[in-house]
């Protein structure tokens, strides 16, 4: 039983390594890689497009409904849960 498990494990390893080697050998050269240019976010003033009172640079949930209660990150607060009556 142990010999069968070793044979299966070895066979699987050989198949996986063979596939890895053949995939690496057949990958075409795509030329030099160029870094992606990501524009810097410039924060100045009190920009607040959704009117939740949180500056755009700190707003993790942009587009909240105007007047909705939000936390310090501009995300909506969960609705209050009413306590269940005590039945003792």
Image (cartoon, rainbow, N blue to C red):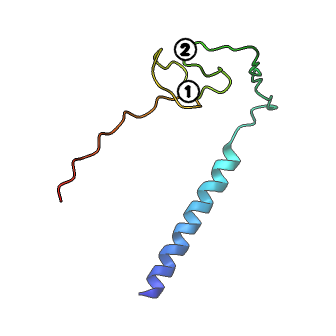
Identified at 47% across, 25% down, the residue is: 69
Give the vertical position of 38 relative to 11 (above or below). Answer: above
Q: Is residue 26 left or right of residue 10?
A: right
Q: Please name the residue that numbered disc 2 is placed on.
A: 50
Give the vertical position of 2 relative to 41 (above or below). Answer: below
Numbered badge on residue 6: none
Q: Please name the residue that numbered disc 1 is placed on.
A: 74
| Secondary structure beneath label 1 | loop
Identified at 74% across, 21% down, the residue is: 41
Mark 1 residue crowding within 10 angstroms, few (<14) / some (14–19) / many (20+):
many
Q: Earlier in the sequence, mark 2 or mark 1?
A: 2
Q: Are dots 2 and 1 in contact, CB under 8 Å?
A: yes
Q: CA distance from mark 2 to mark 1?
A: 9 Å
Quadrant of the rendered image containing residue 81 = top left
Give the farthest residue toward the left. Answer: 87
Q: Nearer the viewer, residue 34 or 55?
A: 55
Give the vertical position of 81 relative to 63 (above or below). Answer: below
Percent across and percent down for residue 6 are 51, 80
Which image quadrant: the N terminus? Answer: bottom left
Percent across and percent down for residue 82 are 29, 40
Percent across and percent down for residue 17 are 62, 62
């Amino acid at each position: 039983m142990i010999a069968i498990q070793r044979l299966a494990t070895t066979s699987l390893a050989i198949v996986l390594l063979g596939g890895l080697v053949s995939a690496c050998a057949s990958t075409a050269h795509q030329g030099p890689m160029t870094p992606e240019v990501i524009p810097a976010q410039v924060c100045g003033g009190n920009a607040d497009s959704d009117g939740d009172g949180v500056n755009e640079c700190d707003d993790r949930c942009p587009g909240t409904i105007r007047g909705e209660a939000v936390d310090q990150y501009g995300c909506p607060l969960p609705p209050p849960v009413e306590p269940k009556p005590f039945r003792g």
